[in-house]
């Protein structure tokens, strides 16, 4: 079985890796389109190492109130994943997931958070299943239960930064931004490989 260093590098190393990554992220946007009934497009994926101290500026100001759907990746790959959403997009997605009229949700109660949690599960599953199909690795799909966080962006990102900071002083982020055609829904999907893998090519 291919080790996780090989699998991560197959997504980020050179033109061939970037082509594979585009294919994987397209599968994610296709899944989002299917579950929301909207046309969801994703931007060109970005792969970047960012100093720990600058991560909080990557998706907006640290004081901005946002929603994060956070998962830990286990099994054949180790890492983290997070969907970062403005509150308006999170509310719109919750309505779509629950087949409710747009504008019904005005706050993220338990039902809305449960709907977003399921969306996080399906999004990461689409990513991992697509990677597994490209690399013929069946043991990738072991995400943790999602955690839905409603807080200032800085506090949300501390969740992903803290375990990395114990190992490295920078963070490798695989990112795509996504939006519908309205645009009512906008967000970012980050995947962060295991920080202990020091030899990943960027």
Image: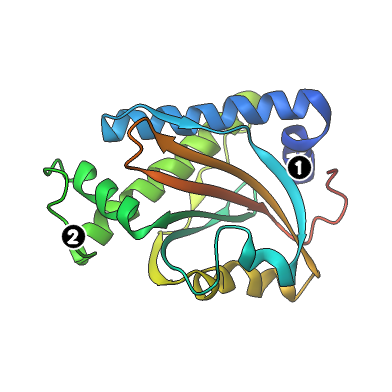
- Which residue: 26% across, 48% down? 92
Looking at the image, residue 165 sits to the left or right of residue 68; the answer is right
Q: Report x, y in % for residue 149.
A: 39, 68
Residue 3: mark in rendering:
1
**Vertical placement of 47 versus 74: above or below?**
above
| Residue 171, x across and y down, in percent | 73, 60
Q: Position of residue 6 (x, y in %)?
A: 79, 38
* Residue in the foreground of this view, choosing between 194 and 44: 44
- The structure residue drawn at horizontal position 31% and vertical position 55%, both measured from the top left corner, is 88
For the point 71% across and 67% down, the residue is 54
Looking at marks 2 and 1 on the same chain, the residue that comes earlier in the sequence is marked by: 1
Q: Which mark is residue 111?
A: 2
Residue 141 visible within the image: yes
Foreground mark, 2 or 1, reads 2
Callout 1: 10 Å neighbours few (<14), some, many (20+)? few
Identify the secondary structure beneath mark 2: helix
Location of residue 78 by image quarter:
bottom right
* Mark 2 vs mark 1, CA separation in Å: 38 Å
Residue 89 is marked as none
């Amino acid at each position: 079985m291919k080790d996780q260093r090989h699998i991560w590098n197959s997504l980020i190393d050179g033109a061939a890796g970037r082509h594979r990554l585009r294919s994987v992220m397209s599968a994610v946007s296709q899944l989002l389109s299917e579950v929301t009934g909207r046309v969801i497009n994703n931007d060109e994926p970005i792969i970047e190492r960012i100093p720990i101290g600058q991560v909080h500026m990557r998706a907006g100001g640290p004081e901005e109130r946002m929603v994060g759907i956070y998962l830990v990746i286990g099994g054949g790959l180790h890492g983290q994943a997070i969907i970062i959403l403005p509150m308006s997009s999170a509310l719109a997605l919750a309505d779509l997931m629950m087949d409710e009229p747009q504008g019904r949700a005005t706050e993220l109660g338990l039902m809305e958070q449960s709907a977003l949690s399921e969306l996080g599960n399906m999004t990461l599953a689409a990513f991992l299943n697509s990677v597994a199909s490209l690399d013929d690795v069946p043991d990738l799909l072991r995400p943790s239960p999602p955690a839905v966080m409603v807080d200032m962006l800085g506090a949300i990102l501390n969740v992903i930064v803290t375990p990395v900071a114990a190992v490295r002083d920078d963070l490798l982020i695989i990112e795509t931004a996504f939006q519908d055609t309205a645009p009512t829904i906008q967000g970012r999907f980050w995947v962060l490989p295991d920080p202990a893998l020091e030899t990943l090519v960027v």
